[in-house]
Image (spheres, grey):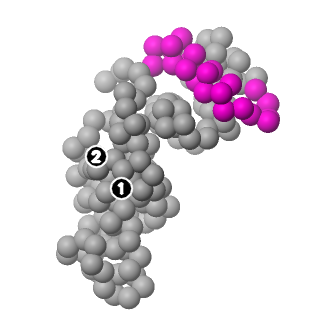
Amino acid sequence: MPDLRRQTTDILALQALTIEMAEPAVAWGWAMVDGERYSDGIWALTALTPPFHWSEVSDLVAQIAREQGLRAPASQDEATRWLAWGHIEDIVAAQGEDFTSLKLVSRLWFDHETSDLHIFYKLKHAIREVEATGEQGHVDGLTAANWKEVLVRTCRDWLAAHSRPDPFGED
């Protein structure tokens, strides 16, 4: 289970991008309770039962953000970066072995065209091709022998160039 900061970052980003988030939002509500953060919106969110309705969940997330003084992403690009941040950290933690997270970041670029995520779209295709055929034409210098190092280095560089999302205003 991701930590409360990661869950909060992801939920606020999903809401900003209008991506389905009902089940993770309810889990986030309970994580807020476990983290000893309480408000009317949190209690209402944790009381929801399926079927979930987007507008109801979204309204409760917005209410919780107001009640808790949370900082939400200011733009679509910032929201995609917030979602990407955790997945990129996961790739680094797995030393390049987390292809699922790479696919999710690639998809964020594909769906939202946040320019600084484009490299991850190219990396996903380069890695698939170099693994399948031994050759690729998407990322200069990436080979079958070094793709994990290139991926992890790119992820570390991206993380260093972007501020870690701080929905609680603690940094």
* Kind of residue indicated by mark 1: Val
The quadrant of the image that shows the N terminus is: top right
Identified at 25% across, 60% down, the residue is 153
How many callouts does the rendering have? 2
Q: Nearer the viewer, residue 32 or 130?
A: 130
In the rendered image, which quarter is residue 61 located in? top right
Magenta range is: 48-70
Q: Report if the CB atoms under discs 2 and 1 are less than 8 Å apart.
A: yes
Q: Is residue 73 left or right of residue 58?
A: left
Which residue position holds label 1? 92
Which numbered disc, 2 or 1, marks the residue that appears first in the sequence?
1
Residue 29 falls inside the magenta stretch: no
Label 2 element class: helix
Q: Residue 21, image x and y in percent?
A: 61, 38
Characterize the magenta stretch by its predominant secondary structure: helix
Horizontally, is 102 left or right of 55 in the view?
Answer: left
Q: Position of residue 57 (x, y in %)?
A: 65, 28
Distance between mark 2 and mark 1 Cα atoms? 10 Å
Residue at 26% x, 40% y: name it: 162
Q: Which residue carries the number 2 mark?
A: 159
Helix, strand or loop under label 1? helix
- Using the image, determine if residue 110 lies above or below residue 34: below
Mark 2: few/some/many CA within 10 Å (<14, 14-19, 20+): some
Amino acid type for the residue under numbered disc 2: Leu
